[in-house]
Every structure is written in structure tokens, then in C-alpha cells.
């Protein structure tokens, strides 16, 4: 599996874990009183976030992402639904890499 595919996979998983933390665990804690929900979801999300940052650093060396892109990807991971924006940018980057301009014969 290429580094870009690994990055996109961990990015999606981390994004879903963040949404579960915000929209499932937080209501369970504050509305229904199940404090254990945020402890479990929070720990899982924290581990996935660390994996995301690690994969971002590793992918930056091989893909390569510019420093600006890496910073944007990191900041987007802190926002709800930001990881899905990052995934769209990465998909676009992969498509641009695959498209080879046609050569013109003279």
C-alpha cells in the first residue's frame, strides 16, 4: 500500500472517530450521564490522532506534501469534518499525478 493510501485511510478513520466522539460520546456523557463513553471514545480517538500525525509526517517525506499542505491537513484534522476535506484534496492530488499530459508530435 502506498504512503498516500495509508495516509488517506488513517485520515478517514480518524475523522470518523472524531465525529463519533463529538456526536455520540459527548451526548451520552452530558445528556444521559454515561461518563465512560467519552473515556473510551476519547482514548481511541487520541490513539488514532497520534497515528494520523505520524502518518502525516511519514507521508510528507515520500508523497511529498508541501509544508503548507501538511499544515493545512493538520489544522483540518482539528475541525469536525475537516479530515474529509483533506481526503478530497489528497484524491485530487492523486488524480493530478496519474494524468499524464499528451505529447504533441510535430
Image: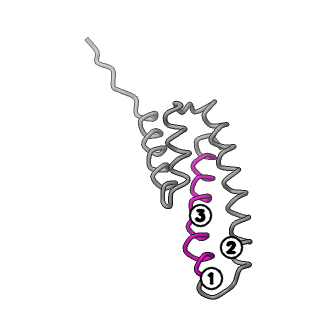
Q: Residue furthest top?
A: 106
- Quadrant of the drawing holding the C terminus: top left
Residue 93 percent across, percent down from the top left: 45, 38
Tag 1 or tag 3, which sits nearer the N-term?
3
Q: Which residue is mark 3?
A: 18
Which mark lies nearer to you, 2 or 3? 2
- The correct choice, above or below, for 10 with respect to 90 in the image is below
Residues tagged 2 and 3 counted as in contact (Cβ below 8 A): no
| Distance from Cα at disc 3 to Cα at disc 1 | 15 Å
Residue 72 percent across, percent down from the top left: 49, 42
Classified by dominant secondary structure, the portion drawn in magenta counts as helix
- Quadrant of the drawing holding the N terminus: top right
Q: Which residue is mark 1?
A: 28
Q: Which mark is residue 38?
A: 2
Give neighbour class at mark 3: few <14, some 14-19, many 20+ (Cα, 10 Å).
many
Q: Which residues are magenta?
A: 6-28
- Tag 3, which secondary structure? helix
Colour scheme in the image?
Answer: one colour
Q: Residue at x 49, y 37 (%)?
A: 69
| Distance from Cα at disc 1 to Cα at disc 2 | 8 Å
Pick whichever, 94 or 22, lies toward us: 22
Q: Is residue 12 magenta?
A: yes
Residue 17 percent across, percent down from the top left: 62, 65
- Tag 2, which secondary structure? helix
Q: Quadrant of residue 4?
A: top right
Give neighbour class at mark 2: few <14, some 14-19, many 20+ (Cα, 10 Å).
many
Q: Which mark is residue 3?
A: none
Amino acid at each position: 500500500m502506498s504512503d498516500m493510501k495509508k495516509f488517506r485511510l488513517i485520515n478517514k478513520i480518524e475523522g470518523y472517530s472524531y465525529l463519533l466522539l463529538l456526536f455520540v460520546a459527548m451526548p451520552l456523557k452530558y445528556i444521559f450521564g454515561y461518563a465512560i463513553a467519552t473515556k473510551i471514545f476519547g482514548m481511541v480517538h487520541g490513539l488514532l490522532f497520534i497515528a494520523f500525525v505520524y502518518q502525516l509526517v511519514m507521508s510528507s517525506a515520500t508523497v511529498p506534501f508541501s509544508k503548507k499542505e501538511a499544515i493545512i491537513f493538520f489544522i483540518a484534522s482539528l475541525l469536525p469534518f475537516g479530515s474529509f476535506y483533506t481526503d478530497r484534496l489528497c484524491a485530487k492530488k492523486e488524480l493530478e499525478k496519474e494524468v499524464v499530459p499528451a505529447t504533441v508530435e510535430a
